[in-house]
Image (cartoon, rainbow, N blue to C red):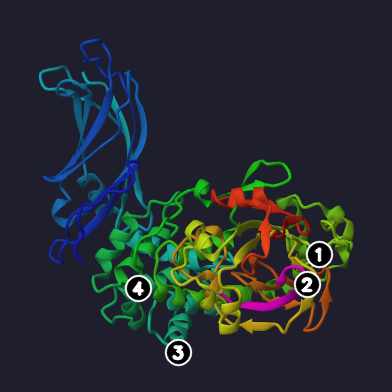
């Protein structure tokens, strides 16, 4: 694998030379340009607008931003540099310039850092398992001027050798696939990891690796045990077949490249490394949006009661799903990842039906500021967390809009809602799944024809929501049909990728035969961490608008409602928000529309 010079966002520039078998990468240097003092004012008008150029070898040049009108600039900007064996005795040169928009930039001074000091220290003390960090306050010299005439530059430089980088790479993998945050990797998690990475390794091969790595025999792998096993195999003369199936042929240089490109806030957490690995293995197609910070992990919703725009934070388990599935667009990769999500869902289902999970109830209430006065049963009557999750509410907590008039429809759940007058509008404004259509959603030619040209309600339930769903209209229940499927998250970030979440996820479909609205199709869609879709009605039952139909076990989920063409006129505020497109936070039982005139 050839490694070429690349860059990422401005605050984290990466310089990557071309490596070869005879001139391999031997070190990763992380440089942080902190600040400078006493920079001379070289502008004609007496200002200093300093910036720093970093030079290494013949080809690598990087620079900071310009700080206007200051002799004491602060940058705090990061740069990374992979160094080849032939470059171990090179210097890193720092040149501070005074920016000039009308003529050549004026040199204030230069300084150098000798890389040999880092390599010599490592040789003297032996290979280190921790980075070597140094803090420099460098005098800036100018030709023909007194030493230090150009001021002083403050930088920090951190060096990571091969052992540090390899261990960081594998520890990042362990952290990423430790779904229950136990600090260990279980047998199923290791199997899930290898499956998710697309390796053809058998369960028997994975079990062999697990048994050999489990040095204390406690049936789990600490991060240290896992890292030790993977790094020893990587450098062993006898190659591990599992490792060979996971990594590219030029594994060592690839690991350098992946860790260098780890630009996440928590450096070394494995996110960029895993993304880079998937790209190298060819699992991804076109790169989609990838959240890089906390702000990107928020969803803006409009509260219907107040009109206020609120940020909805995405739970960690949904982040896992999004990072693994939706950062890149690939049906092949998604099919592998579904095995991980199935394992994650089943594992959490067992956890939250355990009586000890009652301890999670109070922190959950506090975290989401849930109104406990709405809950029907006292908290001490819930036997486990899952029972609390699909709790019933007091009837007065969710009054039904015009309960005795059948010409209006209500929200089926506490949810973040979109309404679209046609399926075409839904796909243009919101749903980006490449195969989303009635045929794939319903898998029934009769239903497909019946709802052709009809309209769609999307009611997304977040984990903190009341998780029982209700009939939007008065009518008779038809025979429910269950469709098995995947465990993809129904989070908006996922819906707006090309993966087909609604048509591939497991779901239950039934019709409600309404006198006023005609036949209405109700679809309960499961998602990541939804242990089950439960119906509390059966074929032939007559339900009133607002009556319960069923509930979801733990996790986020979605209800889809299809109306036949020309049967419903949605409320104007919901239509306006959906056209932006913006989800509207609504409660179960509120009006969403009326019979079309």
Q: Which part of the image, by quadrant, shows the N terminus? A: bottom left
Residue located at (28% from left, 72% from top): 248
Q: Which mark is residue 515?
A: 2
- Where does the image place residue 227, in percent across and percent down from the top left? 42, 68
Mark whose residue sits in front, 3 or 4: 3
Q: Earlier in the sequence, mark 1 or mark 4?
A: 4
Q: Are marks 1 and 2 in contact (CB under 8 Å)?
A: yes
Q: Which part of the image, by quadrant, shows the C terminus? A: bottom right
- Cα separation, mark 3 vs mark 2, equals 59 Å
Q: Which mark is residue 406?
A: 1
Q: Earlier in the sequence, mark 3 or mark 4?
A: 3
- Cα separation, mark 3 vs mark 1, equals 60 Å
The segment highlighted magenta reads 505-518
User: Does dot 3 land on a helix, a strand or a loop?
Assistant: helix
Q: Is residue 236 magenta?
A: no
Between 255 and 477, the residue placed more toward the observer is: 477
Q: Earlier in the sequence, mark 3 or mark 1?
A: 3
Residue located at (17% from left, 24% from top): 105
Q: Kindly identify which residue carries mark 3.
A: 204
Residue located at (63% from left, 63% from top): 457
Q: Earlier in the sequence, mark 1 or mark 2?
A: 1
């Amino acid at each position: 694998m050839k490694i070429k010079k690349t860059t990422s966002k401005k605050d984290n520039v990466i310089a990557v030379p071309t490596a070869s078998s005879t001139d391999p990468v031997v070190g990763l240097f992380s440089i942080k340009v902190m600040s400078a003092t006493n920079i001379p004012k070289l502008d004609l008008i007496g200002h200093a607008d300093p910036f720093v150029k970093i030079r290494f070898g013949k080809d690598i040049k990087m620079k900071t931003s310009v700080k206007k009108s200051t002799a004491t600039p602060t940058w705090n900007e990061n740069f990374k540099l992979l160094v080849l064996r032939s470059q171990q005795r090179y210097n890193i040169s720092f040149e501070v310039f005074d920016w000039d928009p009308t003529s050549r930039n004026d040199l204030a001074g230069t300084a150098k850092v000798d890389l040999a000091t880092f390599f010599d220290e490592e040789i003297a003390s032996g290979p280190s398992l921790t980075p070597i960090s140094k803090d420099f306050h460098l005098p800036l010299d100018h030709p023909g001027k007194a030493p230090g005439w150009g001021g002083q530059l403050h930088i920090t430089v951190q060096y990571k050798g091969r052992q540090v980088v390899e261990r960081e790479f594998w520890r990042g993998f362990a952290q990423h696939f430790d779904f229950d945050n136990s600090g260990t990797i279980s047998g199923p998690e290791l199997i899930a990891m290898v499956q998710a990475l697309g390796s053809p390794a058998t369960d028997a091969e994975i079990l062999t690796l697990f048994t050999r790595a489990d040095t204390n025999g406690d049936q789990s792998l600490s991060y240290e045990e896992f890292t030790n096993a993977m790094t020893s195999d990587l450098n062993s003369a006898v190659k591990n077949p599992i490792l060979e199936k996971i990594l590219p042929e030029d594994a060592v240089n690839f690991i350098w490249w992946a860790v260098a490109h780890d630009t996440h806030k928590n450096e070394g957490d494995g996110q960029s490394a895993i993304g880079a690995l998937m790209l190298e293995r060819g699992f991804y197609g076109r790169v989609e949006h990838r959240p890089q910070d906390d702000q990107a992990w928020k969803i803006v919703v409009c509260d219907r009661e107040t009109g206020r725009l609120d940020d909805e934070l995405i739970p960690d388990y949904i982040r896992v799903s999004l990072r693994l599935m939706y950062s890149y667009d690939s049906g092949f990769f998604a099919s592998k990842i579904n095995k991980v999500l199935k394992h994650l869902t089943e594992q959490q289902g067992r956890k939250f039906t355990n009586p000890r999970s009652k301890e999670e109830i109070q922190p959950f209430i506090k975290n989401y500021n849930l109104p406990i006065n709405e809950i029907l049963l006292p908290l001490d009557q819930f036997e486990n967390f899952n029972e609390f999750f699909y709790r019933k509410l007091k009837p007065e907590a969710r009054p039904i809009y015009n309960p005795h008039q059948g010409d209006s429809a209500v929200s089926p759940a506490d949810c973040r809602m979109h309404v679209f007058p046609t399926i075409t509008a839904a796909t243009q404004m919101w749903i980006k799944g490449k195969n989303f259509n009635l045929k794939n959603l319903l898998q029934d030619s009769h239903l497909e024809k019946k709802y052709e040209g009809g309209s769609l309600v999307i009611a997304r339930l977040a984990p903190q929501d009341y998780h029982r769903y209700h009939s939007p209209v008065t009518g008779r229940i038809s025979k429910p049909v269950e469709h098995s499927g995947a465990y993809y998250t129904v989070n908006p970030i996922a819906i707006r990728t090309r993966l087909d979440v609604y048509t591939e996820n497991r779901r239950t479909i039934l019709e409600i035969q309404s006198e006023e609205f005609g036949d209405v199709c109700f679809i309960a869609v499961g998602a990541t961490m939804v242990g089950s879709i439960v119906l509390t009605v059966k074929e032939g039952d007559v339900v009133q608008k607002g009556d319960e139909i069923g509930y979801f076990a733990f996790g986020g989920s979605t209800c889809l409602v299809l109306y036949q063409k020309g049967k419903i006129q949605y409320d104007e505020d919901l239509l306006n928000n959906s056209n932006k497109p913006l989800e509207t936070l609504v409660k179960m039982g509120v009006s969403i529309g009326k019979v079309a005139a």
